[in-house]
Image (cartoon, rainbow, N blue to C red):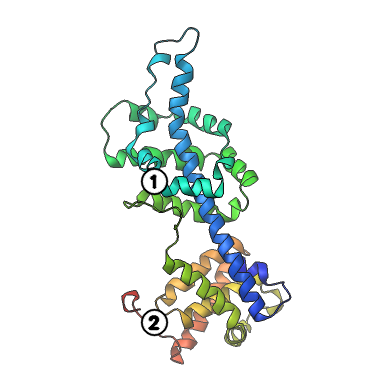
Amino acid sequence: MQTLYSVASLETGVNGFRNIAAKMLDDKLEHVIETFTISVLYTLRVSQFVETDAAKRSIKFLPTTEDLNVDTQIAANSFVMSIVDNKSFHDKIEKSKLERFIDDEWVKKIYKNFIKTDEYINYISTKNHTLSEERDIIRFIWEKQILGNEDMVANFNDEIAGWEDDCELITMLMQNFFNSKSKLDFLKLLSAEKLEYAQDLLSAVLGKESLCLEIIEPKLNNWDKERVANIDLLLLKMGVCEFLFFPTIPTKVTINEYIDIAKQYSTPQSGQFINGVLDNIVKDLVKEDKIHKQNRTNK
């Protein structure tokens, strides 16, 4: 949607649109992967800062017993080590030069807040943790100490281009990251299937615009056509293309997804508008036997 919206005002032919849009989409997807990797890196740095803290406290002129006995077990947390041992993670950081986005002062601030929490105190109170407990304490750093910190999110908005638009997607990727039991390849974060879907949908909307408008415009009779938001029209085109050209995506899934996107990115009335128009379109397309869906396993 963002890519289509960006190229909508360009004055070029269909082939020009496709070439420009494809490049913009690739760049957008790459940026999302980089932002996700930065989010993982920040979370890792906070958990590892305990070692820096322990080292500094131990060389104080008059260190206390507490200074000399800082519990550093979270730095060797099994989930942390799975990230540290992931070569693709380090390769991605080096390839995209992502260390430049990490602010050591913010890492320190987050860490100082984190070690005061009941969750951290409970974690260091025992030495033997389950894999689930190891993962959960790192997830807590991300969800509550970083993403749940308004000042930190404001910093992301300032320092990471497009953070506000990508935040929901990054949050979903981070949830998947914590829930996944398999090793993640940070250099190939999106599967070939997802990349193919993204490019195919982009190409379909650009190449089938006339057909989409023929289907959509009669359904706008009860709406003020001149006041239909540009984003809403784009979402309707995308929805129609999924109805017609993506047989493994159920129509209900398409409608629900575009309702949610409209609510987030368009006007307060857009969710209801998208729901009404797409619902009417799909009913007619079914009557005309133009929608042929199949199970993904039969693709």
- Can residue 146 be seen in this snapshot? yes
Which disc number belongs to residue 43? none
Kind of residue at badge 1: Asn
Q: Residue at x 45, y 38 (%)?
A: 44
Above-or-below relation of 95 to 205:
above
Disc 2 marks which residue?
293
Disc 2 is placed on an element classified as loop
Above-or-below relation of 293 to 41:
below
Question: Hey, which residue is sitting farthest right in the picture?
Answer: 11
**Which residue is at the front of the view, 258 or 161?**
161
Q: Residue at x 53, y 49 (%)?
A: 95
Query: Where residue 83 sits in the image (x, y, percent)?
Result: 39, 43
Q: Residue at x 30, y 42 (%)?
A: 132
Which disc number belongs to residue 86? 1
179 to the left or right of 268 = left
Q: Quadrant of residue 172?
A: bottom left
Kind of residue at badge 2: Lys
Per the model, the C-alpha gap separating discs 1 and 2 is 39 Å
Query: Where residue 161 sits in the image (x, y, percent)?
Result: 63, 51
